[in-house]
Amino acid sequence: MPEDLSRFIDLQLFDALQVIILGFIGGTLSGFIGSGGAFFMTPGMMNLGVPGVVAVASNVAHKFGKAMMGSKRHSEMGNVDKKLGICLILTAFLGNFIAVLINDWLFAGKADSHGGGSGGAAADLYISVVFVSVLTLVAISMLRDVWKTAKDEMGPSRVITDFLARLRLSPMIYFPVADVRISLWILLIVGLATGYLAGTIGVGGFIGVPAMIYVFGLPTTVAAGTELFLAMFMGAFLASNYVYLGYVDLRLTLLLYVGSLLGINVGVYGTKVVKELVIRLVTAIVILLCVISRAVAIPTYLRQLHWIDFDPGWDIYFNQASKIMLFVSGSVGVGVILYNVFKAYRLRRRIHAELEASPPHPVANENVTT
Amino acid sequence: MQVICISRGSYSRGKELAERLAEKLGYECLCREELLEEATRRGIPVGRLEMAIIKPHHLTERLILAKEHYQALVTQIICERALKSNLVYHGRTGHIVLGAISNVLRIRVVSDWEYRVETVMKRLNLSREKAKTYIEQIEEDRRHWVKQLYNLDLDSSSLYDMILNVERMNVDNAAQSLCNIAQLPDFQETPASRKAIEDLLLSARARVALAEHERTCDMQLKVRANNGLVSVTYSPQQARNAAVIPSILEPLEGVREVLSTMARTSILWIQERFDPSSEPFQPLMDIAEKWDAAVELLRFIPLDENQYVETDLGAQNLSGSSLDIEDMGSPRMKVENGGIEEDVEDRCGDDSGMKETICDLAKVGHAGGSRCLQAPPKRILSGIDPGIEYSLIVVGDLFLSKGAHAQKRLCRELGGYLSDHMKCPVVMAEELRTQFLFGKKQCFQTIAYFLISLSMFSLIFINQIPVLRFFSDQQFGIRLLSVLALALYVPVFAYVYGTFSRLLCKYLKLE
């Protein structure tokens, strides 16, 4: 790669294939659990040597187009509360803007103009730390939820929703599609947090969707639809910001699409044949493994910043360990989905074969006249 | 059989009014608390269900089963009591449970806010602020309950025949006025309304029997009854236990035939006349096969709004009306209410192919029951069960008495109306093949979208360096251009490649 393009990686066929696989796994998980899949794709690209900011920026550009299509489909199903989405957009943009500024400052401001030196490592470390902190919380909450659901048969906790409802921080706004009343102040805070995380690590949905469910008390489908509506605007805004600053690698964006748009169909099909509890359990485990994978890469950045000292030859081991763990986590998740899809497909064929073999009369076989 | 359902708000004197009304009319009085008691006695975790429904939005599978059991039991008890004698019911959802029965009088009682607050303050010894919050919270919980159980808005005036404000009226006078209304011919029993309630009772009994049987208590089932024919749909995962369904339902009183169908989802097919050899039948079967869906038939006979209003005003004039339905042998008494109609086989001389179509659907395991509705187009929703989440609604040939162009336009308008009110795709029958199946046209489209995607992809990868230079250029003008280029290129590629991958998955039957 020429000197002036050093922030972008030299893409060989094998790297391109790896990005497509990342996209496919991310897309499958995304269709299966309803998130953007960035929690898998962003660290995956970083493991391939893509600088963190470029990985986030390329993924955000990829998410923008995908959210547009997803939001359209959810909208057709009546799952989008546009009023809520619009209320969240303003502060989400502010969060986006803050995130881009910090990333840019760490990458370019603290380093040379190409993101080399300690600047690239600082941005990578910052992104990795935010990623690990936020997603650890998300994964643990999800595992707790799964445990409680299996044990007590109750849905997600409403403690926060009820507490905020009791507070009644005026002005309260009514959202007809979701059928909830939410304080404007809470909306602004959630919008800001979602926007900041979407801009920093490309995973706004992991905060946006749970916040809408736990804090606002929205039904899951409306939360997912509204988040996609929000993600469409945030994605456009973020992508514009990042491309303006020159961080978007369009090649990575297109390669991600190649895998993810195929994977998303497989994932959505998987939700029809896997129990909800299993979906949540698989999601939590995959996220946790992604977090561990990213955490393993952190010592390398610390060394590059001269905060700790060890043999630079070890970097490759940390990177490989992180990479393997990420692919294992994704493969396990996708394996569970594909196994269930295949099993359901076989069951369907068997039942239909039995039906076809039965006498062709409505009151025969399954139908009984009394 | 006459039923009066009173939906009461908290502390709005609804209970008092219902009891006084029952006393004046000499009717039996049934309240929600009695239903809860019976449900608890039958082992339904009502308290936990109520907490789960009014608080979080997620229901576990077991609670969903408890919810279905509870709904069926409530329906069964109300219907049984209503068929035994005249009944005044007061509670939250009686008017919804019996909403499709034409002669049920549905009343909403509202009361002065100040009176309610003071009552709560006195009874619960609360301060004014706390009493207000308390009432608001209860009202909110009720709204959630109705929304979750029946997907309806409790406050919607369309759910009631009358909303009675007792702020300036004493309970005795309010009860007297309701006595007078109850005498109107509109609220008297008709053969059709009796049959509708009998069908409702039978389906509820069947659902309760299945919910209380050890082999089927874990199954999520949809049960319908029509003139003794009980249709049960179950998902493919539950196929193993489905064989016992007929043996459980056989002994139930009123069951003539049991039809059980494996289905993961439901498709609603709306037509005026059905014919298994017609054009939409085969594509619909293919889609049902792909989706493991049960196809439910709704025979919809559109009435003119003016005719409807006339009949609504005076049922006694119907014999002189020139409605088309008269020619079809449908009972006139049902016309004025637009509710779910009678059994087609028995009541209509011509069943318009429904029986034959259902038979053909049953042969391939996709029968999802049938019903008939005669109403103006804007009242079609009264014939669609809001509790069922359809994956698709297919609008077929309707408005047959109109000319071809008017027919097409009216069908489109009806489809649009349904799209606005139902949370699922609504398609015209002729669009089925193009939208959901993979034919020659789709094959051509797949190739075209693939080629466009490939070209867009190659364009970037053949010119990697210039593209990256363009996107990382420092000049202000180029930066703005790069933003514009990305905003255009990415969504277009996502759309083109997304369409290609969707078509490919459709071809692989992975939808």
Image (spheres, coloured by chain):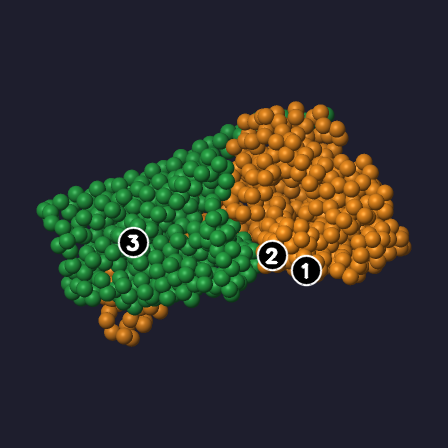
Q: In the rendered image, what is the letter of the chain coloured orange?
A: B
Query: Residue beneath label 1, please?
Result: B113
Q: Quadrant of residue B289?
A: top right
Q: On what subunit does the disc labeled 2 rest?
A: B
Residue B27 in percent (x, y) is at 83, 42
Q: Which residue is mark 2?
A: B127
- The residue lying at 65 percent from left, 59 percent from top is B413
Disc 1 and disc 3: Cα gap in Å?
50 Å
In the rendered structure, the residue with mark 1 lies on which chain? B
Tell me where residue B98 appears, x and y as whole percent. 73, 45
Name the outermost residue toward the left. A311
Q: Do discs 2 and 1 belong to a common subunit?
A: yes
- Which numbered mark, 1 or 3, is in the foreground of this view? 1
In depth, the one of B330 and B30 nearer the eye is: B30
Horizontal side of residue B396 vs A62, given as left or right: right
B72 vs A136: above or below? above
- Within 10 Å of the Cα at label 1, are there few (<14), some (14-19), or many (20+) other Cα atoms? some
- Residue at the image point whose x is 39% and y is 62% from the top: A192
Q: Position of residue B301 (x, y in %)?
A: 74, 51
Q: Amino acid at mark 1?
A: Trp
Q: B5 or B311: which is nearer to us?
A: B5
The residue closer to the viewer here, B497 or B122, is B122
